[in-house]
Amino acid sequence: MRIRKLKIDDAEDLYRVAKGRKLRRWAINIPKFKTLRDVDEYIKKVNSSKKRIVFGISFKGKVVGCVSLRKINKMNKNAELSYWIGEKYWGRGFATKAVKLALKFAFEKLKLHRIYAVTFEENVASRRVLEKNGFKFEGISREVSFRYGKWRNKLRFGILESEWKHG
């Protein structure tokens, strides 16, 4: 498993893995693709963005999810991390490893100071990915999203470059 820049050739893989029902229920920042053309446009858009870097999570040559650094703020040296994995690939440690690689890129290449991430309170697996990578719980936004007939809380986690280095 590795992370890499998305290519137009990844469109079919991305389209397929982004459709999972359970995934859509819990992922906060997953794009909604209606057609393959939407995926092509998404890949072109993210590859030309200055405020967002999206990596495909590649396993055996196929994209099985994405990890991204969004809202990159160069002045304050921080960004928001988000990630998702296709349901078929859950439980294999891919998200944990992808986040680890994205943090290395953020701190070593982009020279950022702080990375934060947000997850739904019920998404225990996502919380574990963050904790395994050294993120600290920073707070809760109560009833901030209405999904599936219920108000949902979001939890915020963060990690500083110094914590990552010495973690």
Image (tube, rainbow, N blue to C red):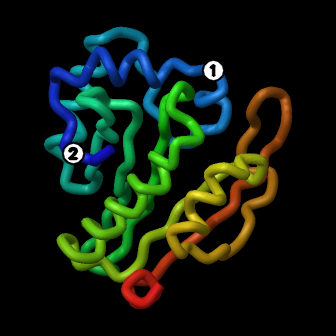
In the image, residue 23 above or below residue 166: above
Of labels 1 and 2, the one closer to you? 2
Residue 106: image location, x then y, percent: 29, 68
Q: Which residue corresponds to the image point at 25% horizontal and 73% vertical from the top-left?
A: 74
Of residue 115 and residue 13, the one placed in the foreground of this image is 13
Q: Which residue corresponds to the image point at 85% horizontal and 35% vertical from the top-left?
A: 150
Q: Amino acid at mark 2?
A: Arg
In the image, residue 19 above or below residue 46: above
Residue 114 placement: quadrant: bottom left
Of residue 122 and residue 51, the one placed in the foreground of this image is 122
Residue hosting label 2: 4
Q: Which residue corresponds to the image point at 21% horizontal and 71% vertical from the top-left?
A: 110
In the image, residue 60 above or below residue 144: above
Image disc number at residue 104: none
Which quadrant of the figure contains the N terminus? top left
Residue 137: image location, x then y, percent: 67, 73
Q: From the viewer's perspective, is 83 left or right of 27?
A: left
Residue hosting label 1: 21
Q: Are the residues tagged 1 and 2 within 8 Å (C-beta)?
A: no
Residue 11: image location, x then y, percent: 26, 20
Characterize the local packing of mark 2: few (<14), some (14-19) or many (20 or more) Cα atoms within 10 angstroms: some
Q: Secondary structure at mark 1?
A: helix
Q: CA distance from mark 1 to mark 2?
A: 25 Å
Q: Secondary structure at mark 2?
A: strand
Q: Which residue corresponds to the image point at 37% horizontal and 55% vertical from the top-left?
A: 70
Q: From the viewer's perspective, is 118 left or right of 160?
A: right
